[in-house]
Amino acid sequence: MRMLVQGHRVLALCAVLLIGIAPCVAAQAPRDSTLLWDDGEAASYGNSIQPNYGAKLAVGFDAPSWAQSVIEVDLYVTSHGGDWPFPGPPDTTYAFTVCLWAADVAEPNKPGELVTWVEAGSGHPVDSWVHVSFPEPVGVVDTVAFPSGRFFVGVLWTSRFSPAVGVDFDAPLDGRTWFSDGETWGIVDDRDAMVRAVVSDVSGSAVESLSWGNIKALYD
């Protein structure tokens, strides 16, 4: 495995008292790290993962032992390619929804129940990273829903046209990308989708799983 972790922790300044210099006490700020499989270089448009209304894209991650929650999802968006198959926005995206799924109960390597979601809005510049924060940290410490800290984040498309999601073809490929054009998930094993998760040591709220019907009803 080659999941990369980009993180940091900030130390506060030592306090100085009027009666003298107090012992240095390091107050630690919340810790966060970005989990990723891609190398940051997107392949050409023709190899991107294409949008379709109701389709879903998910990428799986295992939260580090110190992580308590997921706070943000980052994804690289691009255009659907001009006039093919339909005209679409050339420079900015249509609206889409960012989701977090638990692991499947029977097959933990694939996405299971939808846990939470947030609307990403429209108008994001194509060929760039979009950073979408959840309204509050989403806890991933429930070992039933998230065995070994495994969770999935990605996109639910609410348009046929936009956005496409960038991919990385460079080895090693990690087999953590999943796609669904309806109810059934299938693994995408020839590329890594450019979707990342930001985890934190801040405690997150447990969220009841949601059904696809709850989400689909928003757009019917």
Image: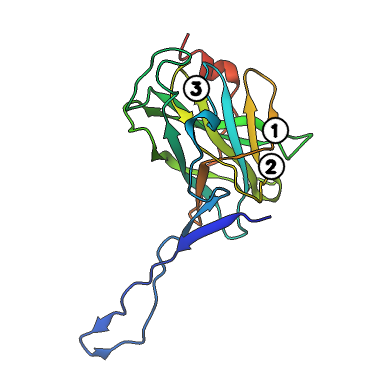
Q: Residue 83 location in percent, x, y? A: 41, 15
Q: Which amino acid does label 1 sit on?
A: Ile
- In the image, taking residue 33 as reference, residue 57 lies left or right, namely right
SS of the residue at dot 3? Answer: strand
Q: Residue placed at 60% from the left, 57% from the top?
A: 64
- Where is residue 151 drawn, in percent x and y? 62, 42
Q: Which residue is drawn at 43% across and 34% down?
A: 77
Front-lying residue, 73 or 37: 37
**Residue type, mark 2 in image:** Gly
Q: Mark 2 points at which residue?
A: 175
What is the CA distance from the residue labelled 2 to the residue labelled 3?
21 Å
Q: Name the residue under label 3.
A: 157
View extreme (bottom): residue: 20
Quadrant hosting residue 127: top left
Any part of residue 75 in sight: yes
28 vs 168, nearest the viewer: 168
Q: Which residue is labeled 1 in the image? A: 187
Q: Which of marks 3 and 1 is nearer the N terminus?
A: 3
Element type where label 2 sits in the image: loop
Query: Disc 1 on helix, strand or loop?
Result: strand
